[in-house]
Structures are given as structure tokens and as C-alpha cells.
Amino acid sequence: MQITSEKIIHTDVLIIGGGTAGCYAALTLRSLSDASVVIAEKADIRRSGCLAAGVNALNAYITKGHTPQFYVDYAKKDAAGIVREDLLLTMSEGLNEVTRKLEDLGLVILKDEKGEYVARGTRNIKINGENIKTILADAVKKLDGVQVINHLNITDYIVRDNTMAGALGFDMRTGTAYEIRAKAVLCATGGAAGLYRPNNPGFSRHKMWYCPFNTGAGYAMGIRAGAEMTTFEMRFIALRCKDTIAPTGTIAQGVGAKQVNARGDVYEQKYGLTTSQRLYGTVRETLDGNGPCYLRTEGITPAQDESLLKAYLNMAPSQTLKWIESGKLPSQQNVEIEGTEPYVVGGHTASGYWVDTNRQTTIRHLYAAGDVAGGCPQKYVTGALVEGEIAAKNMVRQGLSDASGLDEAQEKAILAEKVAEYNAALGETDSFFTVEQLEEAMQKVMDTYAGGIGSHYQYNEKQLALADEKIDQLMELAAHVGASDYHELLFVYELRERLTVCKVLIAHLRARKETRWHSFAENLDYPEQRADWLKYVNSRMDEDGQVHMIYRDLVPGGETYEHTH
Amino acid sequence: MSIRIKQERCIGCGQCIDVCPGSLIDRNGQGKAWMHYPKDCWGCVSCVKVCPVQAIDFYLGADMGGRGSTMNVTADGHYLHWHIHKADGSEKTITVDRKQANSY
């Protein structure tokens, strides 16, 4: 099997990834300008990305009596200081407006008798988010001037003189190779799952917290193109319901369930209440012989049981099925909890592209929004929408012009070179290892030597050095792996993307010589938090694949940040 | 974590093939939907919701505590009726009003 045909498309703006941030950027672009837009989506925008099953609350909202700065302060504290306050503040200032727009588009939000949104805690509001993704997709489909290309997997950027000129990919169904030339590009591909051995390593290996189809493509393309990345070492590990890896917040906040160990002791106060401390406490209790740990739900009312069953159907239906299947509702049995494998995901932690206040990356005319953009943790769904909006507004403000200077012959040559690469993988019928074998090997290396579940999220310098060496070996093997159809070609590229992300992640874990966040980055050789590490750890890969670390001072609150190219 | 597609019910409309966020469902020689990559399923149930003839059942793998119960869904205006068929033959239906927000 080979690539069947080639297409070169020209557009003003290319959006890679039709998820939360990507869809909202398209809506913003068309509301402010006549710019032509192409959305390249690996699946189908109707249910692609993190929100496929739905979401049960909007976790980033400025509730009554609070200010955007309140949200900034919360996120900064939770991340132990390693945030970009300019990014957090500009995000926080836009949260309520995008929420109102979502409601206009059809999202159901719970209101009180005065017509005001009902808060869940100090930063969240209650919704029915089962159809949040279809609402966004339907709004995009109504737009003129926006071409959505579903099942198109983008594999590489086209960059000339550190300026974005477009991207390359292939249609997984037809085998058509695409070159999409654009004046500006928004990377909105999401974060990276599948780097580490997951909770359910066998048949249910993809029953994980983060969308398993978010494989770090956006990070990997940027890394290879020389974009600067930040704070990969601040991994995200979620505290979840055991087996189903369903959210715990709905139970904890919904019915006020406390975290208890197997002896029935409430332990959460003992370790602190930041996101990483809650997770770390659960790990510690288990290591100290007090496991397993639970959310204490026994004794809740039948009405509360019923509400939980319904709430989970709107975002994680496997948990509802598990309760019914086991014959024990939460009122009858505490809900066991566990930590997931680590992910790199900028919607929760500060990992991702190093961007300026306008969400432009260090590559000119390349923007990043949502989980792929760094420096702005706890952005969640609404924050991703705001970032898509900020990026789109800045594209319009800057004006769209083709700065690449590529002529038709050069365009054809660029695509031909990529088609040859695709065809080499498609023509490789005798590769020694399969993608699946190499993926398992990668996950084992990361689990064992780079702080996965099996090593209780801990590592030391020697282990990280081994991880780096072994990931390099796997990268060499992955260069020769073959694909028998276009879907397998996708798997080949996903494997390579994950390995690239692993390589940079390990470099970041090695660079931060302290333990700033328990579990998220727990270096046993440097077990303390140190004031001199209150700075950003950034990185850039050179053309030979070497990762160079860049250390930057914190951007103070109240300032904006511009790149010095 | 995965789905089963009942071949006798499938009408080959292809909506599940389009909607799956992992592109895991393909068409077989009979023109019907076929779960090509069961181990890669995230359990989002997008396919179960989009199927117009309830040909797709969702179930928990044995490694997640599954014992053979299945779940599918029918839509009735803004109501979603989730039908759970337990392995012991009993059934339970939970109805969710899409116009009502979660109380939690």
C-alpha cells in the first residue's frame, strides 16, 4: 500500500486539532474577520478529543464575589509558583464571557431562582456537559469560510527561517497526502497520553484518564521544529476511581466524601490540599501499609446515589455501569481511589509550548492553545476556549500575510519528500518489531526509570539516565517500523511522537534538581523544595536531536511577555 | 473496556465509524460496522449514543471488574434512557434529562 494522491491547499489560518480550543478559535476568527480557515482533525470534530464522553462541570469560572486575580493566585499556589501570571490572568479575565457564549450555543448550566449560575465550590459551576463537544462542532459547521477536514492526521510543520508556513499530513481513510499552506497556524492538538504504563495495562489499556488519542503530536512537531517548551517536568497525575479511572471530584464535592485509608482514617489534611499533595497522600498511605484508599461514601442517601449514577452517565458512563454491575451503590460501599499514570498536559499543569502573552510560540505565526500550551495550569475546558480566542484575536490583530516566500515548485518538493517518508513506512513489510511492541517497551521504560505507577512516581538521577538511554534505543527502532495500512501509519507516527515527548520529558525531569511537587516530579536524589529553583525549566531541541535546557526567571505578575527572537 | 456490535441489528449506516474519536471501527465485507481495535477503546460511548438501532453494547472488561453486563442508550427528545442488561438477566434503566444540569 502506498499514498494514493497528493493535495496542496492554501488557507489563511490552519487549526491543527478540532477540539475545544481549536473549535473556539475558528468561531472567533470568523466573528472578527473574513480569514479562511482549515481545521485539520485526526478523528471527527463531533466527538474528538478530551470531551468525547462529556464533562460534568466547568472547573474554571470566576464565581460571584471573586476576581480573575483570585483564580491566578489559586493556580499559582497549586503549582508552587511555577506559572506564568500573564497567561493565567488573561485566561481568567475571559472565562465568564466564553461560558456565556457556550450557554448561548446550547450548553445547559444550572441556575438558581435569581437566574444566576449555581457554583460548585469557589471556582466551578454545574452543567450538563454530555453534549458539549457536539454543541461546539455544530457551531463550527455552520460557519462560512471554514473547511473541516476530518480524519486528516498532521505529522509535521513546514517552517522556514523560524516562520510558520503550514503543515503536512495524510488522510487516514483515503491515503491522500496533504500539504496545507497557511499564513498562521494554531496548534490545538491536546497533550500526551500513553507515555507511561497505564493503570489497566491489558485489555482495558485505553481506559485511562486522558484521551488516549491525544498522543503528543503538537508537542512533538514543535520540538522537532525547534520551538521552546516549558515545564514538562511538572507531570500531571490524576486521582481517580479505581479501574474505571473516572473522576473523583464529583463524589468529593458532590456528596462531601473525604479521602480515607483502609483503617477509616481521614488522611487528606495530613499531606496538604494541593492537587499533587492529594495524590501524594494516597501514594504515601498505601506505601505505609494503610491502603487501599477510598472516598468515604458509605451512608449517603438513596437520592444521592441516584444523582451520582446520573452524573457519571454524563461524563464517565463506565463508573455507573460498574456500580450497577457490582450490585453495590456508593451508599453501600466506599469508592476505591488510585493515581493514574503520569501525563504531559498543559490544561492541568504548566507543561507545553513556551508562548508569549498572545499565545504565540517561539516560531513566528505559530500559536498554541489548550492542553498543548504551557505556563497556564488549571485552565480546563473554559480556559482552553479563552486561549483559542486570544490566539485568534492576535492573528487578526497582527494581520495575515505569507512570509514564507515558497513558490509552487518548492511546495511540490516539500510534499514529495514527505510522501516518500510515508511510503517508506507503508512499504516496510518486514519490520522486526511492531508498533505495539515498541509502545509497550517505551511504557515499561518510563514506568520503571522515569517515575511511573510501578515506581510510585519516584526516580533518581541514575534511573533517569537509564531512561534516556533506553528511549534513544527505542527511537532508533521506531525509525524502521512499518505500516500495512493508513491507520497503522497513524500508529507509527503516534509512537514516534510519544518517544519524542518522552525524550524531552526525561531531560526536564533531570534538569530540575529539587522536588517542587510531590509525585508530579519526585526526585529522590533531591527530595527537598529549594528557593533557587523558583524558575522556569525550558528546553529546545537542535537539528541533531539534542535537547538543550534554558533556565528563565519567573515573569512577574502585572507584566506581559514578548519573545526576543 | 470495549463495545460489541450486534451484526444482526447493524444497518451499516456508518455513523459509529465516523464518530469514534479513535477511528477504531471499520466496515466489514458485509458492509456492517466492525470493532477493529477493541483494546484501544476509551469507553466514551460516542458510538453507542449515535447508533440509530441500538446495535452497539458497551461493557466492562474483566480486568475492570466486568462480569458480562452490557449498556446501551436510546434517545427520546432531550431524554437519554440508559439501559443496563445485567449478566443475571435483570435490567435497569436510568433516564437522564439533557436539559437538566448535574446536581453535583
Image (cartoon, helix red, strand yellow):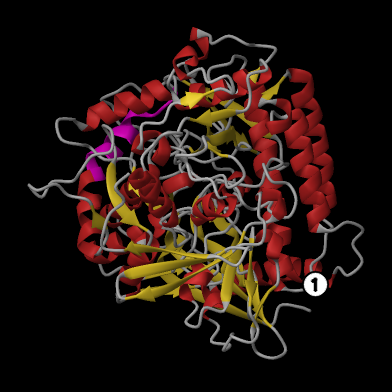
Residue A183 seen in the figure: yes
Q: Quadrant of residue B23?
A: bottom right
Q: Position of residue A133 (x, y in %)?
A: 39, 62
Residue at x 79%, y 66% (from the top left corner): A425
* Magenta stretch contains residue A92: yes
Picture coordinates of residue A220, whole percent (x, y): 61, 48
Which segment is the magenta one? A82-95
A222 lies above or below A404: above
Label 1 sits on residue? A484
* Rendered location of residue A476, percent (x, y): 83, 47
| Camera-side residue of B62 and A496 | B62
Residue A387 makes an appearance in the image: no
- The secondary element bearing badge 1 is classed as loop
Where residue A216 appears, as percent x and y from the top left, is 59, 49
- Location of residue A373 by image quarter: top left
Q: Amino acid at mark 1?
A: Ser
Q: Above or below — where is A519 with respect to A479?
A: above
Query: Of residues A396 and B5, which is closer to you in this image?
Result: B5
Count of residue discs: 1
In the image, is A34 to the left or to the right of A403?
left
